[in-house]
Amino acid sequence: MRLPPSYPMALLAALITLTPIVILITLATDASSLFDSHNLKILSNTLSLMVLTVIGSILIGVPLAFISAYVHLPFKKLWLVFFAAPLAIPSYIGAFTLYAAFGSGGEIHNLLGIELPSMDGLSGAAIVMTLYTFPFVMMTTRSSLLSLDASMVNAARTLGMSMTQSVFKVILPRVVNGIAAGSLLVALYTLSDFGTPAMMRLDTFTRVIYVEYNSFELSRAAMLSLQLLVIVGFLLLIESQIKTASERHGRALMLFPNKWQLGAMFATFAPVLLLAIGLPLTIFSLWLARDGFSSFDFSIAWHSAYASAIAAVVAVIVAIPVAHAALSGKAGRIMERVTYFGFGIPGIVMGTALVYGGLQLPFLYQTLGLLIIAYMLRFLPLAVGSVRTSTEHLDPSLVKSARVLGASPREAFTRITLPLTMRGIIAGAALVFLESMRELEATLLLGPTGFETLSTYLWRVYEAGYFGRAAIPGLLLVLISACGLAIMMSGEKRNQPEH
């Protein structure tokens, strides 16, 4: 049986995706011990941060999902943007600004004379991670809420239940999977994040892996990386088992609170939005007014854009055959699932593996090419998902007609399939570009000597204590992330059911 032409390239992409895991296993064989007391402390800190962040994200995200889905608000679409806006700020930027703002000698103390507790350690990291991950829970829960028919709630109210009882006995049980899906996204994000625990001085797996790497203990870093991957793999296994319940769409529930209830809602959640969005933007604006533009070399922004653009092009070139293979049969779907491993591997782990790979291949070590490979492996699923979605909606009769009229498979692809799926290809490239611009961990480990990006420059000024110089790269990264959020929100709008 003749294999589809996309299979060889898709198989190659799947094998390359597995390479970092093979490298880590090889490296870890030289590690002296699997577990010691320090490992247990790292594991405890990592799991504690994950659990606290998930709990905080549920406590904030679920009520906001109810408000954005069911409550009649003035300027409702604008409020949805505000609720999701923390996703437009990388968590390490939030950690940087909150660390600089709080505590003795912090910006709040200097400006207002109010000495607030310092933001560091487990509590500080959990607060920061919660502020920038609760929208994951909000978005998945909101999507589940919008799929529910209001008739069951109305029936419960008719039978004598209060609105509060209806929420807990009728609505919440039907959206548990949506809450769980968002919570797992939060957990995975927390496990993979390096910048926040590092800036908050909390020894989690990601921070200690970076410390071991800088101490030239690659085998120890590899062992810790594998231990972290076991936890990530367990969460991915749970995530694959979660099925969102599908219900027949009906009329959406709509609640009309009075002005006092609206005021109570805003008073409850305004501090969250002010801390997550208002404070970082205020701190960066303050630093910009204080230090101006002269302290920043704009070639750093060009470095970020240049590397990210190449990574985006490479990712979509690889994603096209992977996406087409996934639509061609079971073997192709397996290859596509394998490429998703790269997205589950934390950036610090990917960087550790590829550093060793670069040492074995000197022509790649500390080159831009190796950094682009890391970006491509990490964010390839974003491009694959976008290309596959656009290809799935393509009418197959168009390609069949072209073949009947004498076009070769290559001609049918270049003249029919490619132009009609170009929107998905561009969207996938844009997502890879934006995520590569934000990437910190892999860039710190793999960036060529003297090659500074916006994210690594932000890290360097944090380490040096020159906080004012972070204003321009910080604001640029927020703007870039806002573009990514806009793409996400547009997808959410297209997928929202009509009521």
Image (cartoon, helix red, strand yellow):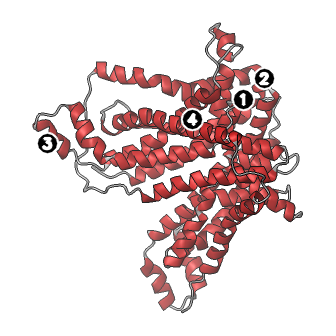
Q: Amino acid at mark 1?
A: Ala
**Who comes first in sequence, dot 3 or dot 2?**
3
As drawn, the label of residue 129 is 4
> Where is residue 32 shown, x and y percent of the image?
78, 52
**Who comes first in sequence, dot 2 or dot 4?**
4
Quarter of the image with the N terminus is bottom right
**Who comes first in sequence, dot 4 or dot 3?**
4
State the separation of the CA atoms marked 1 and 2. 8 Å
The front one of 176 and 266 is 176
State the separation of the CA atoms marked 4 and 3. 39 Å
Q: Amino acid at mark 4?
A: Met
Residue at the disc numbered 1: 471
Residue placed at 66% from the left, 11% from the top? 109
* SS assignment at label 3: helix
In front: mark 1 or mark 4? 4
In front: mark 4 or mark 3? 4
Q: Quadrant of residue 264?
A: top left
State the separation of the CA atoms marked 3 and 1. 54 Å
* SS assignment at label 1: helix
